Image (spheres, helix red, strand yellow):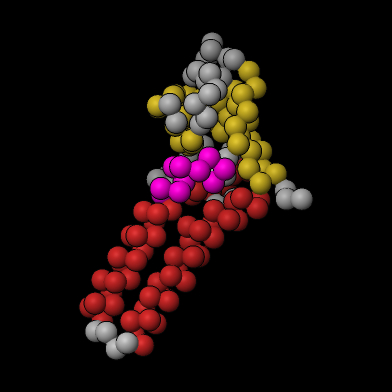
Amino acid sequence: MSKKLTHRAKIIEIINEEKALIEIDNYNICKNCPSKSMCNPLDENSNIKIIDINKNFDLQPGDIIEVETSSNKLFKSTFLIYMLPIVIVLITALFMKKFQINDLLTAISTIFVLILYFFILHIIYKKTPQFKYLQIRKLTNNNKN
Protein backbone atom coordinates (compact mmCIF):
# COMPACT_ATOMS: atom_id res chain seq x y z
CA MET A 1 0.00 0.00 0.00
CA SER A 2 1.35 3.41 -0.90
CA LYS A 3 1.97 6.14 1.60
CA LYS A 4 -0.55 9.00 1.65
CA LEU A 5 0.54 12.62 1.71
CA THR A 6 -2.16 14.82 3.27
CA HIS A 7 -2.39 18.58 3.92
CA ARG A 8 -5.10 20.86 5.20
CA ALA A 9 -5.69 23.98 3.18
CA LYS A 10 -7.94 27.01 3.09
CA ILE A 11 -9.72 28.09 -0.08
CA ILE A 12 -8.65 31.67 -0.85
CA GLU A 13 -10.36 32.11 -4.20
CA ILE A 14 -12.36 30.04 -6.67
CA ILE A 15 -10.76 30.87 -10.03
CA ASN A 16 -13.27 28.94 -12.15
CA GLU A 17 -15.26 25.69 -12.02
CA GLU A 18 -12.09 23.61 -12.19
CA LYS A 19 -9.42 25.62 -10.35
CA ALA A 20 -9.02 27.15 -6.92
CA LEU A 21 -6.36 29.16 -5.15
CA ILE A 22 -5.53 27.60 -1.76
CA GLU A 23 -3.27 28.32 1.18
CA ILE A 24 -1.64 25.22 2.63
CA ASP A 25 -1.41 24.85 6.41
CA ASN A 26 1.84 23.51 7.84
CA TYR A 27 3.74 24.50 4.71
CA ASN A 28 7.09 23.44 6.21
CA ILE A 29 6.34 19.87 5.16
CA CYS A 30 6.01 20.96 1.51
CA LYS A 31 9.37 22.73 1.47
CA ASN A 32 11.23 19.39 1.47
CA CYS A 33 8.98 17.66 -1.05
CA PRO A 34 10.89 16.73 -4.22
CA SER A 35 7.76 17.33 -6.31
CA LYS A 36 6.71 20.67 -4.86
CA SER A 37 6.83 22.26 -8.30
CA MET A 38 3.98 19.99 -9.40
CA CYS A 39 1.53 22.01 -7.27
CA ASN A 40 2.54 25.39 -8.60
CA PRO A 41 5.40 25.50 -11.10
CA LEU A 42 5.46 29.31 -11.15
CA ASP A 43 6.39 29.73 -7.48
CA GLU A 44 7.24 26.48 -5.73
CA ASN A 45 8.39 28.27 -2.56
CA SER A 46 4.98 29.76 -1.81
CA ASN A 47 2.31 28.19 0.40
CA ILE A 48 -0.30 29.61 -2.00
CA LYS A 49 -1.09 27.06 -4.73
CA ILE A 50 -3.46 26.70 -7.66
CA ILE A 51 -5.08 23.26 -7.74
CA ASP A 52 -7.69 21.44 -9.79
CA ILE A 53 -10.98 20.98 -7.99
CA ASN A 54 -14.02 18.79 -8.49
CA LYS A 55 -16.81 20.99 -9.80
CA ASN A 56 -19.35 18.87 -7.85
CA PHE A 57 -18.05 20.33 -4.55
CA ASP A 58 -19.72 23.45 -3.27
CA LEU A 59 -16.50 25.24 -2.35
CA GLN A 60 -16.41 28.86 -1.23
CA PRO A 61 -13.55 31.12 -0.14
CA GLY A 62 -12.78 30.38 3.52
CA ASP A 63 -13.69 26.68 3.33
CA ILE A 64 -11.20 24.26 4.85
CA ILE A 65 -10.27 21.30 2.67
CA GLU A 66 -7.93 18.35 2.86
CA VAL A 67 -5.66 17.75 -0.12
CA GLU A 68 -4.33 14.21 -0.45
CA THR A 69 -2.21 12.21 -2.84
CA SER A 70 -0.47 8.88 -2.77
CA SER A 71 3.26 8.54 -3.26
CA ASN A 72 2.56 6.20 -6.20
CA LYS A 73 0.53 8.84 -8.03
CA LEU A 74 3.18 11.43 -7.29
CA PHE A 75 5.89 9.17 -8.69
CA LYS A 76 3.82 8.44 -11.83
CA SER A 77 3.29 12.16 -12.40
CA THR A 78 6.99 12.85 -11.92
CA PHE A 79 7.87 10.06 -14.34
CA LEU A 80 5.45 11.31 -17.02
CA ILE A 81 6.49 14.94 -16.74
CA TYR A 82 10.26 14.70 -16.20
CA MET A 83 11.73 11.27 -16.97
CA LEU A 84 9.76 10.02 -19.97
CA PRO A 85 10.43 13.16 -22.05
CA ILE A 86 14.17 12.61 -21.61
CA VAL A 87 13.79 9.07 -22.92
CA ILE A 88 11.71 10.35 -25.85
CA VAL A 89 14.37 12.94 -26.73
CA LEU A 90 17.12 10.30 -26.65
CA ILE A 91 15.14 7.82 -28.77
CA THR A 92 14.28 10.51 -31.32
CA ALA A 93 17.90 11.67 -31.56
CA LEU A 94 19.23 8.11 -31.89
CA PHE A 95 16.62 7.30 -34.54
CA MET A 96 17.57 10.39 -36.56
CA LYS A 97 21.29 9.63 -36.18
CA LYS A 98 20.79 6.06 -37.36
CA PHE A 99 19.34 7.35 -40.62
CA GLN A 100 22.06 10.03 -40.85
CA ILE A 101 19.69 12.98 -40.75
CA ASN A 102 21.45 16.34 -40.33
CA ASP A 103 21.66 18.01 -36.91
CA LEU A 104 19.22 20.84 -37.63
CA LEU A 105 16.48 18.43 -38.71
CA THR A 106 17.25 16.23 -35.68
CA ALA A 107 16.82 19.21 -33.34
CA ILE A 108 13.58 20.29 -35.02
CA SER A 109 12.23 16.74 -34.94
CA THR A 110 13.11 16.33 -31.27
CA ILE A 111 11.35 19.58 -30.34
CA PHE A 112 8.33 18.62 -32.44
CA VAL A 113 8.10 15.18 -30.77
CA LEU A 114 8.29 16.80 -27.32
CA ILE A 115 5.58 19.32 -28.18
CA LEU A 116 3.40 16.50 -29.49
CA TYR A 117 4.05 14.43 -26.34
CA PHE A 118 3.10 17.25 -23.95
CA PHE A 119 0.06 18.14 -26.05
CA ILE A 120 -1.19 14.54 -25.84
CA LEU A 121 -0.38 14.43 -22.13
CA HIS A 122 -2.38 17.64 -21.64
CA ILE A 123 -5.40 16.20 -23.47
CA ILE A 124 -5.25 13.00 -21.41
CA TYR A 125 -4.96 15.03 -18.20
CA LYS A 126 -8.00 17.13 -19.07
CA LYS A 127 -10.17 14.17 -20.18
CA THR A 128 -9.25 11.60 -17.50
CA PRO A 129 -10.22 12.46 -13.91
CA GLN A 130 -8.26 9.54 -12.39
CA PHE A 131 -5.09 10.90 -14.03
CA LYS A 132 -5.14 13.84 -11.65
CA TYR A 133 -3.06 13.05 -8.62
CA LEU A 134 -4.73 15.23 -5.95
CA GLN A 135 -7.85 14.16 -4.08
CA ILE A 136 -9.82 16.86 -2.27
CA ARG A 137 -12.17 16.49 0.69
CA LYS A 138 -14.19 19.39 2.06
CA LEU A 139 -13.84 19.54 5.84
CA THR A 140 -15.65 22.68 7.02
CA ASN A 141 -17.41 25.82 5.93
CA ASN A 142 -15.49 28.78 7.28
CA ASN A 143 -16.67 31.88 5.44
CA LYS A 144 -15.76 34.31 8.22
CA ASN A 145 -12.08 34.84 7.20
> Which residue sits furthest front?
127
* Magenta highlight on residue 91: no
* Magenta highlight on residue 127: yes
Query: In x, y percent, where is residue 59?
Result: 52, 20
Q: Relative to residue 64, is residue 52 depicted above or below?
A: below
**Does residue 11 appear left or right of residue 42 in this picture?**
right
Q: Nearer the viewer, residue 98 or 40?
A: 98
Q: Is residue 36 visible?
A: yes
> Which residue sits furthest top?
144
Q: Quadrant of residue 4?
A: top right
Q: Nearer the viewer, residue 22 or 91?
A: 91
Figure label count: 0
- Residue at the image position 33 percent from the left and 81 percent from the top: 96
Q: Is residue 25 visible?
A: no
Over which residues does the magenta segment extend?
122-131
Q: Nearer the viewer, residue 98 or 46?
A: 98
Query: In x, y percent, where is residue 75?
Result: 60, 56
- Residue at the image position 44 percent from the left and 31 percent from the top: 19
**Does residue 128 appear left or right of residue 111 in this picture?**
right
Query: In x, y percent, where is residue 69?
Result: 63, 43
Q: Main secondary structure of the magenta part?
A: helix
Q: Relative to residue 87, is residue 7 depicted above or below?
A: above
- Residue at the image position 49 percent from the left and 49 percent from the top: 37
Query: In x, y percent, where is residue 33?
Result: 59, 50
Q: Relative to residue 24, is residue 62 depicted above or below?
A: above
Q: Relative to residue 38, is residue 136 depicted above or below?
A: above
- Residue at the image position 65 percent from the left and 22 percent from the top: 139
